[in-house]
Structure formats: C-alpha cells, structure tokens
Amino acid sequence: MIDKLHYISQQPTNETHITAIKAALLAGCKWIQLRVKDQPENVIIEYALEARALCEEFDAKLIVNDHPEIALKAGAYGLHLGLQDIPIAQARQIVGNQMIIGGTANTFEHIEQRVAEGADYIGLGPYRFTKTKQKLSPILGLEGYREILERVRSGGINIPIIAIGGIEPNDIPAIMQTGVHGVAISGAITHAADAAQTTQHIYRQLHMNVLKEV
C-alpha cells in the first residue's frame, strides 16, 4: 500500500536529516523518504540505519533515495530512483523482488517508461519551483498534472502517482482533483510552526479530495 503522504527528508539549519525525520514521525508521517545529496555513502548508510530504527519505532515505512545498496543494507521498505539514477531493472537485481521501487517522472512518456521498467509508484513533478532539488525538470503546474493524468487514464495506466515539488498544504485539494494518488512534501512539514497540526491537516485534505467524475 503506497501512502498518500510522502515526507521527503531535508537537512534543517544546524541539524541533520535524522532530526527532520524524527520530527516528521512525531508529527504523524508514515512514509519517510531519506533523500541525502552530496554526502559520502558512509554517512548516508548511518542515516539510513538510524532512520530505519526510527521508522520501526513509529510503525512507518522508510524509502531510501538513489542508493539501492544502502536501501538493502538498512532493510528499507523501498527505494526511489531519479531519471538519472541507476535503471530500475538493475536496482531490482540488487534489492530483490520484495522491495518497493518508485521512479521519478516529468512527462507522460516518462510514466510509460517507468511502468515498462516495473516501478511500483511514480513521483511526478515538479509542481512548482523548489530549492530542494538541483537541475530541476520543467515545472508542470496544475495544468500539467491535468493533461498528464488525463493521458494516463486514457491509456489505461493504473499506477499510484505522487505529486511532488514545492507543494504547500493549500495546493492539495486542486492537485488531488487531477487524479494523483497523493503528494510528497518536504519544506511545508520541515519548517512548519506546528508540524503535527500541519500533517493532520494534510492527511485530511488527501482523504477528503478524490477525483470527481467528469
């Protein structure tokens, strides 16, 4: 079961990814993606092991971004791969058949590619500009999601699609109306004045808004 809310870790000022992940878990997040860039693998594996232990404590699922070997060593629930990362088929040989694998997409063609590669879910974005990612793909906006999800439905494609990229809680009702399965959020939870209240509000928005029949 792919959760409707994916928390993407980021390093707060003067703190660590683990600090952010623990705060997100305390706030009620149940699907945690450890996304660490520009740090050595020995640091990332330590983060992954700590994050896995925390996720077990809070009955949450850990997804590791980019690193199949680390995901395997840490006993993560899943792996998420960007378009420039190792191919899903190659990663599958490393992590085995039991681990969930998600893949990033920016276009309908990318979604077709990810489905063909055997992805379990897709992170489609970015919704708007975000500072958390370098080399940002073209911004989709609400209209971009509408067009792509319409093609997904017309093509008979049935895979959970998670909207990602600069999403704020107030964006969720309109985004969910496009037909996505859920959203990935980072800064709106990491920097929230009250992370628990924000997370509860997000979950309410996600479960209240379903695709309206046209």
Image (cartoon, rainbow, N blue to C red):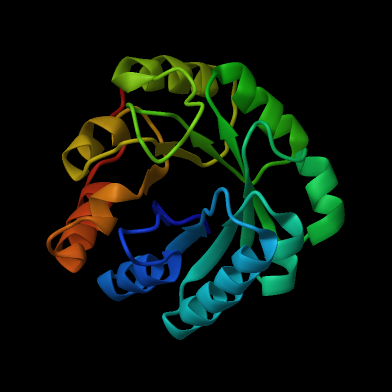
Image location (x, y in percent) of residue 23 = 31, 71
Residue found at x 81% / y 51%:
92
Image coordinates for residue 81, horizontal then vertical, percent: 64, 43
List the single residue furthest toward the front.
14
Residue 167's x, y, as percent? 29, 38
| Residue sitting at x 14%, y 64% | 194
**As drawn, 133 above or below 72:** above
Q: How many marks can you see? A: 0
**Towards the viewer: 206 or 168:** 168
Query: Up-down: is 13 above or below 28?
Result: above
- Looking at the picture, tell me which residue is in the foreground, 159 or 214: 159
Say which quarter of the image contains residue 75: bottom right
* Point 40% across, 37% down: residue: 164
Along the horizontal axis of the image, is 149 left or right of 122?
left
Residue name at image x 26 percent, y 70 percent: 27
Task: Classify residue 103 as left or right of residue 153.
Answer: right
Residue 73 appears in the figure: yes
Q: Is residue 211 visible?
A: no
Name the image quarter holding residue 158: top right
Q: Which corner quadrant holds the C terminus?
A: top left
Task: Indicate the position of residue 63 as horizontal and vertical percent values.
Answer: 57, 60
Position of residue 165 in the picture relative to residue 189 (left or right): right
